[in-house]
Image (cartoon, helix red, strand yellow):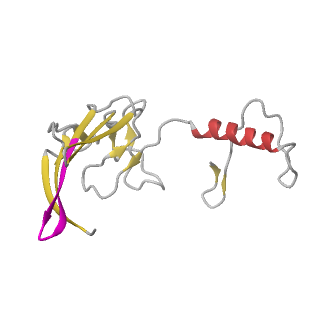
Amino acid sequence: MTGSSRHPKIEIEYPTWVDSLAKWNEPYESSEDKMRLAIAVSRTNVDRGDVTRETTGISGTGTYVIEPRYQISTVLAGHIGRTELGVHYFVRQGYAAPYFRSQVTGSVDATADTGKNVLLVSDVNDFRLPMMHSVDLRISRPFRLINHAWRVDVDLFNVINRATVTALGYDARLASFDTTQQVVSPFAARIGVRFEFK
C-alpha cells in the first residue's frame, strides 16, 4: 500500500503469466479463466511471510503471536463399562521470540513521538521458545440419585505438568529483557456434577 495517509494507493501484484486484465465492466472469456486468475492472485499476494501481532489484555508481557508452522490436536475417547474416558493431546511449535528495542534514539518522527521499536533479529522466526505439549483427561460416569439421572465429571488439565515458557521479555531496553513472563498453567483438577433432563 502506497500513497498519502488520506488517499492510500493499493498495489496488487499479479502472476508473471498475466499480460493484461479485462476492463471491470467486461466479462472474462470464461468462468474458468476468472477463477484461475483469482486463485493465482491470492497465492501471489497472500504468502508474503509471517504476520506478527501483539496480544491485548496481557498487561506488561508484550507477547507477540506468530502462527506456528505445525500444530496437532488429537482426541481419543472410549468407555469401560459405564465410565467414559477421554484424552486430549495438544502439541505445537514453540512461540516465536521477536526480540526488539523500543524507543530507539534518533527514531522520533510524526508516527512515533517517543521513538520507534526496532527488531533485533533478521526474521521473526529466528528464535522460538520450547515446543509446547499438553495432555488433558476426562473421566465421566452416570448415576441415579432420588430417581433422577446425574453425571459426575472429573477433568485433569496439563497432566504432565510441563511449565512450558510461552512469553519472554522481548524489549532489550527493559530490565525484564529475556526473562520469563508467562508459562503454561500448571496441573489442575476439576470435579463437576450434572443433572440430566431425560
Residue nearer the viewer, 40 or 99: 40
Tell me if residue 51 can be seen. yes
Give the quadrant of residue 46: top right
Residue nearer the viewer, 135 or 125: 135
Q: Is residue 140 magenta?
A: yes
Q: Is residue 27 magenta?
A: no
Query: Left of 86 or right of it: where is 54?
Result: right
Q: Residue furthest front?
A: 147
Residue nearer the viewer, 34 or 118: 34
Query: Left of 56 or right of it: where is 37?
Result: right
Report the predominant secondary structure element of the magenta stretch.
strand
Look at 72% across and 33% down and name the residue there. 15
Give the residues drawn in magenta, as a range. Answer: 136-151
If the image is split into quadrants, where does the C terminus sit?
Answer: bottom left
Q: Is residue 133 above or below residue 149?
A: above
Query: Left of 160 or right of it: where is 113?
Result: right
Q: Is residue 196 above or below residue 157?
A: below
Tell me if residue 98 can be seen. no
Query: Left of 100 or right of it: where is 3?
Result: right
Residue nearer the viewer, 198 or 181: 198
User: Which percent across, then down, holds residue 138?
Assistant: 20, 47
Look at 72% across and 37% down and name the residue there. 14
User: Which percent across, then down, holds residue 89?
Assistant: 27, 37
User: Which percent across, then down, holds residue 82?
Assistant: 19, 49
Give the quadrant of residue 114: bottom left
